[in-house]
Amino acid sequence: MKLKPLNPENNNSIIFGNSHSGLHYWIGLLSNGHDYFIGQSFRSPATGRLRSICILPELILENITARLSVFHFDRERSQCREKLAETVVTLQTCDAKSWASFNSLDLELERDKDYCFKIDCNDGKMMAVAECAWNNAPGCSDGAEWVGHSANTDGHFFAGFGLTFLAEIRAN
């Protein structure tokens, strides 16, 4: 199954994010026994319903179930707060290098408020997710990439990197 990138249904849709890539980050169960995740913080460019977030899997070793969770983000402390939404998608090896869309979020975002999302796949499998260093391409420079693992669930935020992602908000 090839997944398609965002396709706004009307002129009220706002697409934002970073479509550039160059590097990748492995998530899932690595040989050290930890389950790794990746995510991104962002500032909402509009008030409206978050319809979808797409990521770019570079390599999928075997069919995998990926979960995307959205949180409030405390920018001053670089911490995720309460979970606001969650959705799951099953990816096949042939979905590598195609946009993977996490739909059914239907979450109300507020303009200029900070949020973050994370992607994990805790089913004992792995995939490489595209990312980019900010000095290599323009992107969602008001956010930071979020990485962590099962022994460090708070993770770390890195302002010099960004996850390759696109998001759609249906503006009010």
Image (cartoon, rainbow, N blue to C red):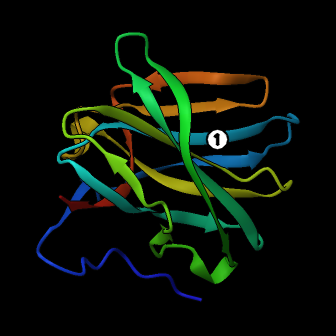
Q: Secondary structure at mark 1?
A: strand
Crowd band around label 1 with a 10 angstrom C-alpha radius: few (<14), some (14–19), many (20+): many
**Would you say 126 lies left or right of 144 here?**
right
Q: In the rendering, at what x and y percent does residue 70 appear?
A: 50, 44
Identified at 36% across, 76% down, the residue is 5
Identified at 32% across, 38% down, the residue is 42
Q: In the rendering, at what x and y percent does residue 126 appear?
A: 74, 56
Kind of residue indicated by mark 1: Phe
Say if 64 sits above or below 133 in the image. Answer: below
Q: In the rendering, at what x and y percent does residue 128 appear?
A: 60, 56
Residue at the far bottom: name it.
1
Quarter of the image where one finds residue 52: bottom left
Observer-nearest of 4 and 62? 4
Identified at 48% across, 70% down, the residue is 101
Total marks shown come to 1
Residue at the far left: name it.
11
Question: Which quadrant holds the C terminus?
Answer: bottom left
The residue that mark 1 highlights is 37
Observer-nearest of 39 and 49? 49
Q: In the rendering, at what x and y percent does residue 108 appear?
A: 35, 50
Quarter of the image where one finds residue 123: bottom right
Identified at 35% across, 11% down, the residue is 76
Say if 44 sits above or below 153 in the image. Answer: below
Say if 1 sits above or below 38 in the image. Answer: below
Question: Which quadrant holds the N terminus?
Answer: bottom right
Observer-nearest of 151 and 111? 111
